[in-house]
Amino acid sequence: MKKRTILSILLLLVFHPIVFSQVTDAESKLRTIVTDTIPGWKKGGILGLSLAQTSLTNWASGGQNSLAINGLISVFANYKKDNIAWDNSLDVGYGLLKQGKNSDYMKTDDKFDFMSKFGKKATKNFFYTALLNVRTQMTVGKDYAKDTSKISNFLAPLYVIGALGMDYKPNSYFGAFIAPLTGKITWVNDQELANAGAFGVQGAKYDNLGAILELGKKSKSEFGGYVRIIYSRNDFKNELLKNVSFTTKADLFSNYLHNPQFVDVSWETQVALQVNKYIRVNVNTHLIWDKDILIPIDTNNDGTMDDSKALVQFKEILGVGLSYKF
């Protein structure tokens, strides 16, 4: 009995390194296989808040008190496994400005933009892709520089785009989606704005006395071609500019059925400078041109808006504030 016990111990000591090595190698390979085959979700986002205040008391040079606040939520959830790629993103921004003691808060930013893009690999860098994009705003909008009349509202406008095409993705920074089959719906969830024909919907019909014969349509459907181009370096590891992230994206849409030569343009750019872990400087710009969006104008400079036409719209926001990236 003692001889068998001693022999077993000797065999264990001799073969232990080999057995341990085999188990360790097998476990290592198993971990590698599991890591490579588990469905991969990549999630993240940025929460930002910037404030600006001016307070004046007996200030000889003049001016007025002001308070500005801007908030930003930008999140994404991307899935990739085998030949499947599914990208989802949500951008929400809102800003308010108050000038003087007796003035009301004025809206300076209002944005809701959701995008979901599902693709299956066709070749090395090309994917058969379906895209859904929803863009709208959350509260009443006014052009305070001209007057205080309402020019937009909650879900007025609401843009919904559904597209089928090819997505070219040569790397993780650049993408070009080309969709020859695209449907676009414009919804105006405000009858007053719909009656005025805002955002290209069919306006109300009136009789000679100004009474409404037929209410304005709240929606408009279009069919055409769509292109979305995006370049993004938001990892703050750009070799040319350290601690700087840059994202620019352009959306182009042409309506096959009506004036296809007029291409709707939406071009957004965001530049962020990371000062430290929580403080960031942001510059956001947004350029829009849409033939169906008419801007009131004063043709004879008498202070009265007496006409309207399609103009280039441009928004720029510069903010310094707190941010959290996850």
Image (spheres, rainbow, N blue to C red):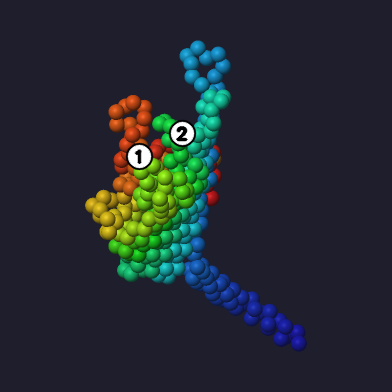
Whole-percent x, y for residue 188 in the image: 44, 51
Q: Residue at x 23, y 52 (%)?
A: 261
| Image position of 83 with respect to 182: above or below | below
Name of the residue lying farthest toward the left = 261
**Quick one: label 2, few (<14), some, or many (20+) residues within 10 Å?**
few
Q: Badges 1 and 2: C-beta atoms under 8 Å apart?
A: no
Dot label at residue 148: 2
> What is the spatial separation of the Cα atoms under label 1 and label 2, in whole angstroms?
14 Å
Q: Quadrant of residue 283?
A: top left
Q: Secondary structure at mark 1?
A: strand
In the foreground, 6 or 128: 128
- Name the residue tied to disc 1: 295
Q: Position of residue 247 (x, y in %)?
A: 39, 47
- In what element is the residue under mark 2? loop
Query: What kind of residue is marked 1?
Result: Ile
Which residue is rendered at x = 50% and y = 12% of the image? 60
Q: Is residue 249 above or below residue 55?
A: below
Residue at the far top: name it.
60
Q: Residues within 10 Å of mark 1 (few under 14, many from 20)?
A: some
Placement of the N terminus among the 4 image quadrants = bottom right
Three-letter amino acid code at the position of disc 2: Thr
Residue 226 visible? The answer is yes
Q: Nearer the viewer, residue 81 or 90?
A: 90
Residue at 39% across, 42% down: 209
Q: How many marks?
A: 2
Q: Residue at left 55%, top 22%?
A: 55
Which disc, if any, is residue 206?
none
Residue 298 image offset from top left, x and y in percent: 33, 31
Question: Mark 1 or mark 2: which comes first in sequence?
Answer: 2
Q: Residue furthest right?
A: 1
Q: Position of residue 253 (x, y in %)?
A: 31, 54
Q: Is residue 137 visible?
A: no
